[in-house]
Amino acid sequence: MCTTCGCGTGEVKIDGADVSHETAHGHDHVHADGTTHSHEHEHDHHLEHSHRYAPAHSHAPGLGNKRMVQIEQDILAKNNTYAAQNRQRLLERGIFALNLVSSPGSGKTTLLCKTIAMLNGEPVAVIEGDQQTSQDAERIRATGAPAIQINTGKGCHLDAHMVGHAMEKLSLAENSLLMIENVGNLVCPAAFDLGEAHKVAILSVTEGEDKPIKYPDMFRAASVMLLNKIDLLPYVNFDVDTAIGFARRVNPTIRVIRVSATSGEGMGEWLTFLREGLASTGNTKQETVDSLKRRVAELEAQLQRSQS
């Protein structure tokens, strides 16, 4: 159970296969060098039955504030461990990963489809997160890009363990883009690192300008805000400068890109951001490889000197 919102943890499926038991009890991560690491989740039985004994003000029914804080810290610490492992695997293979977060209906999937089309065959894969159905993954696959669907059941966000499973099933290409479309929710996904390089918050002009100050944790956690559906500005009451001002009030360094998947406006700047990120990730991978080669050479030289 998420102690922020009280959502459930069971019924997780990846491309229709039930991994609830597997996700609860652990899985192996396979690294680029062929080594594997086994990970275990521990159950907290206070969570499983807590809904029956809830204080009226509690976010996690049946738990006192001190216990809630402790459990949430434990959950996030475990998640951060899996996220660090995901991030290492991605960097080892030069994969630039983004975590797309927003309210429901912001246009994430349409934007992804347009992005894939404009990348024109450049390697990209997608992990889709929804509580139910595989419709979004099917839309992505129709563009020709590989996609895998995670259904979270009662859960309202993806976590790093789910994403680790999905990455294994996707067979990601080296030096490629990975786009993770999170469950539509501006609360819990802010707290859960998936191993991505950046969180990208999508705010459409059909929503209120005050979303960034109503949900500050999300916009504070994001590196980029895509102001989406700007082709609709003539038809809606939305003040762009106010929205950007609110976003920068909670996150002064956030980068804002105005886009429309329908008209294509702003998509060039978005693609430039993606390609620059991919190039930077590739450079980091090469620097790591070069550093390892230098270290191996130094060790071999030391060995030769010791034997002479």
Image (tube, rainbow, N blue to C red):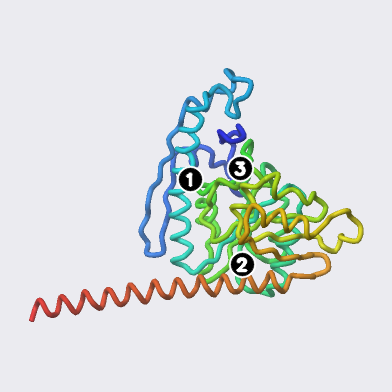
Q: From this viewpoint, which residue is outermost toward the right?
A: 235
Callout 1 amino acid: Asn
Mark 3 or 2 closer to N-term? 2
Q: Which residue is mark 3?
A: 188
Q: CA distance from mark 3 to mark 2?
A: 26 Å
The front one of 11 and 77 is 77
- Residue with the most extreme top position: 53
Which residue is tagged 2? 124
Q: Secondary structure at mark 2?
A: strand
The local crowd at label 3, few if under 14, some if 14 to 19, many if 20 or more residues have their Cα within 10 Å, is: many
* Apparent side of residue 213 relative to residue 209 in the rendered image (left or right): left
**Mark carried by residue 68:** none
Please tell me in which quadrant of the rendered image residue 17 appears.
Answer: top right
Tell us which disc is closer to us: 2 or 1.
1
User: For numbered disc 1, what is the local secondary structure?
Assistant: helix
Of tags 3 and 2, which is closer to the observer? 3
Q: Which residue is mark 1?
A: 79
The answer to whether residue 233 is left or right of residue 131 is right
Q: Of the residues shown, which amino acid type is indicated by label 3?
A: Cys
Camera-side residue of 268 and 48: 268
Residue 176, percent from left and from top: 56, 69
> What's the residue at 67%, 54% (across, down)?
249
- Above or below 188: residue 182: below
